[in-house]
Amino acid sequence: MSKIPVGISTCLLGGEVRHDGGHKHSRYCTQVLSRYFDFRSICPELEAGLGVPRPAIHLREVDDGLKLVEVKGGEDHTAAVHAFIDQVMPALGDLRGYILMAKSPSCGMERIKVHNADGNVTRRDGRGMFAEALIREYPLMPVEEEGRLNDDQLRENFIERVFAYDDWMQNVAGDRLTPQALIEFHTRHKFQLLAHSEKIYRQLGPMLGDLKSEPLVDIAGRYIHRFMAAMTQRVSRGSHVNAMQHLMGYLRDVLEDEERRVLLEQIDAYHRGEVPLIVPMTLLRMAQRREPIDYLSRQHYLSPYPDDLGLRNRI
Ligand code: SF4
């Protein structure tokens, strides 16, 4: 399997590029995710020419907008960072996801402090200048802060989205778009959609009902925006239970009575929080593997990412 291209803040890979010459090495990124992600690192401040070490900078809101200025002295680096962003952004369209360093006025995704001309904090809901441009330019791309990957559900959600978006980019996007490619993508991800958002799941099927009513590229554009919005939603235990029960329906003729009883027991135990998702999911996969149902073997819900990431052992 070729690795998936994913962007990352350079300091998270251990690059000594922070303003004080330090780094923010993430072992989870370099030792676990790097098995599947081909990381492309960017340090916007360094690559905009600010150097290492460099004076600390922060976001400052003045009459003509947000600026990146030195905390002490107030020298303005906005133009240099903007010029770098304009130059690098078009080259990031092939990335399937991005992991950003938190709290940075350049890379931070959320809750970044914004200051006034006197240097006082006026709000804490800012976004780093590079992160803002990235999310505006590539609204479909899964983007997450490294710190948030410590949360089991957020980590699982981000990685699942990266793999789903990679499937879209590899098999449907651009000149690979055909009615068949679009329908097959939808079919592969039906149970994931059902788990993430039953509401959007029920909207997307009819959207693909008549692919001749307007240009396919328009339908596909609307589809993938709704799809990625659904995938961003957290999956509750109840939603996983609902999806697994739907899946069991397809295995009706495959499951022995005893097997069905054990599976229902384990789904209930998962619902009560007594066992992780991997337990009922493994039973479903074993039944499916023994007597494969073609429709289910195409469902990414059963294996949305490599097992050795261990993500379903924790939710
Ligand atoms: S947070 Fe971003 S700008 Fe700051 S050191 Fe890391 S990569 Fe560079």
Image (cartoon, rainbow, N blue to C red):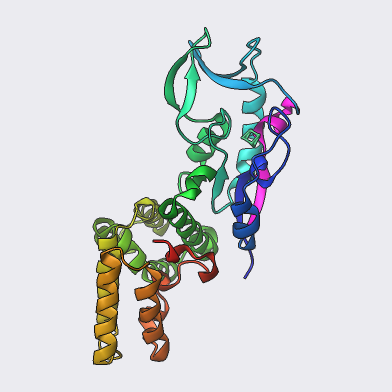
Q: Residue 127 or 311: which is nearer the viewer?
A: 311
Which residue does the image show at 39% across and 61% down from the upper left?
315
| Magenta span contains residue 45 | yes
Q: Residue 130 or 291: which is nearer the viewer?
A: 291
Which residue does the image show at 46% across and 44% down from the upper left?
139
The answer, for residue 243, to whether it is visible in the render is no
Q: Residue 233 or 90: which is nearer the viewer?
A: 233
Q: Residue furthest top?
A: 118
Residue 208 image position (x, y, % from top left):
31, 64
Q: Quadrant of ligand 1?
A: top right
Which residue does the image show at 71% across and 33% down from the upper left?
47
Residue 133 image position (x, y, % from top left):
53, 34
Q: Locate residue 145 relative to residue 278 in the image: left or right.
A: right
Residue 143 image position (x, y, % from top left):
50, 46
Q: Locate residue 187 relative to residue 59 in the image: left or right.
A: left
Q: Residue 215 or 147: which is nearer the viewer?
A: 147
Q: Residue furthest front?
A: 274
Viewport quadrant of the N terminus: bottom right
Image height of 260 relative to 228, above or below: below
Image height of 59 relative to 266, above or below: above
Residue 193 image position (x, y, % from top left):
33, 62
The answer, for residue 179, to whether it is visible in the render is yes
Image height of 203 relative to 76, above or below: below
Which residue does the image show at 31% across and 66% down from the upper left?
274
Numbered marks: total: 0
| Magenta span contains residue 141 | no
- Which span is picked out in magenta? 38-51
